[in-house]
Amino acid sequence: MGLAKRIIPCLDVTNGRVVKGINFVALRDAGDPVEIARRYDEQGADELTFLDITASSDNRDIILRIIEEVAAQVFIPLTVGGGVREVGDVRRLLNAGADKVSINTSAIQNPQLVADAAGHYGSQCIVVAIDAKRVSGVDLDTNRWEVFTHGGRRATGLDAVEWAMKMQSLGAGEILLTSMDRDGTHNGFDLGLTRAVSDALDIPVIASGGVGSLQHLVDGVIQGHAEAVLAASIFHYGEYSIRQAKEYMAQHGIEVRL
Amino acid sequence: MTDIAIVDYGMGNLRSVSKALEHVAPKATVVITSDPVVVRQASRVVFPGQGAMPNCMHEMDSRGLRDAVMHAAANKPFLGICLGLQMLFETSEEGNVKGLGILPGKVRRFPAAAAMHNADGQKLKVPHMGWNQVHQAIEHPLWHGINNDARFYFVHSYYVDADNLEPVAGYSFYPFQFTCAVARDNIFAVQFHPEKSHSAGLTLLGNFVQWEPSATN
């Protein structure tokens, strides 16, 4: 017995509401973030991730108030991402009650931000989020994934595995890895991507994008070698509870916190 | 007078610790402070810490907090969390820095993931991040009401290697056995984050705010 694999519900938040999109578009309202956070906490979630997908910077402060409110009543780790552009943004989120801050687009525009933030606040609170798309590969040996930004609209030319290794070397404490091909599809994680990145790194990898069944969570850990699995819609719409997901994983030989 | 002082030397988010203490002790005055006088006058002291140990030692000293922390560790209920555990020991491999030397032993780094595997042959990542089981090595008022082997939330790349078993109050495995809690007189210190460990963590914090070391030891 030892370290448990983690289940992390993800709350995409815009204008104070939790929403869920399909392939990063077509948003659907899923409820109040504080209420949802409390529900997942009661069900035994191991951490919570909030992604602020608010387009306008005018409404950035809404997420701070939500995190403050959640942090006062939910005593599990909270990760917050979205719109983090400078060390000051990291500080504001940590001060509001976030335990980890996730950096995505800004890491690509300014990799030094990851080094500065990790140097200042410690690697343990710096997560780098990577959105990747499969770009080639007819078989397992030639698979390749490219990093995308801006919700999957902009290609960067960066190889996802190499980029993840670079982020580790700059001080990232964890990688949140999302398959853009699978996100919102309910077809399961891109296991090749998850495994390629996880096996290349010393730091933990959270698999994300595509969960539609409990078996997908098991696959992410056993085949994808992820230390944690992230999902949104299967939990938001009451299809499964966190507890059910953990029991299913335990039945399949995965150590979880029950 | 301050009931509980959380020592703030500029390393990390102390809001979670503060909120969790307020949650378990709604009537207590909980303050986050970098004022040595407030720390000296508090009836209980929580000593947290995040980031790198050389920075923690430096920031603590630059705020003139060392004497107040040493005084608290010698005199009143004292709870170290994460780096606040590691800093109690003599030295750390992290930057080869000296700690406070209150407890005998060293702080060492987990080997790289490439060198660590679990029984199933799976690579063990560093930092050790997530919920691990805590084996209670001794009976202690702070373990009261917490199941042996309950899970707590960890996030760290360095661990305490105590020179003798005397202060070890709890241990975990990753994959080898390491000390995750120590206790001596009025000191209790843990590697994990009780403020992030749901009901087990809140129980531990609740035990701390009621702990009367002189009466129990």
Image: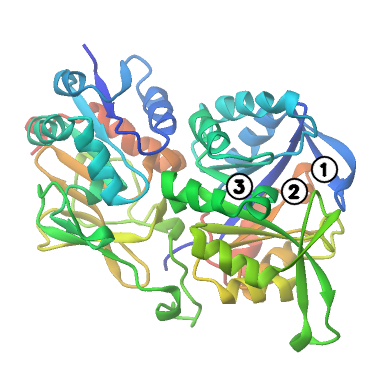
For residue B6, say whether it is visible: yes
Secondary structure state at the residue bearing disc 3 = strand
Q: Do marks 2 and 1 share a chain?
A: yes
Q: Name the chain letter of the residue that bears numbered label 2.
A: A
- Rendering quarter of residue B178: bottom left
Marks 2/1 in contact by CB < 8 Å: the verdict is: yes
Residue shown at the point (52%, 50%) measured from the top left:
A126
- The quadrant of the image that shows the N terminus of chain A is bottom left
In the foreground, B202 or A26: A26
Vertical arrangement, residue B203 with respect to residue B23, above or below:
below
Considering every residue shown, the one lying at the far top of the view is: B1
Colouring used for the render: rainbow
Q: Which residue is mark 3?
A: A102
Please state which of residues A226 and A201 is positioned toward the viewer in this rendering: A201
Q: How many marks?
A: 3
At a point 18% along the width and 24% down the height, the residue shown is B36
Choose the circle earlier in sequence order: 2 or 1: 1
Give how far across and how far down residue B150 sits, in percent: 39, 52
Q: Residue at x 26, y 59 (%)?
A: B95
Crowdedness near tag 2: few (<14), some (14–19) or many (≥20) residues, C-alpha within 10 Å: many
Q: Amino acid at mark 3?
A: Ser
Quote the CA–CA distance across marks 3 and 1. Answer: 18 Å
Secondary structure at numbered mark 1: strand
Q: Residue at x 24, y 18 (%)?
A: B3
- Chain at numbered mark 1: A
Image mark for residue A117: none
Q: Residue flagged by tag 2: what amino acid is it?
A: Ala
* Left or right of A73, for residue B185: left
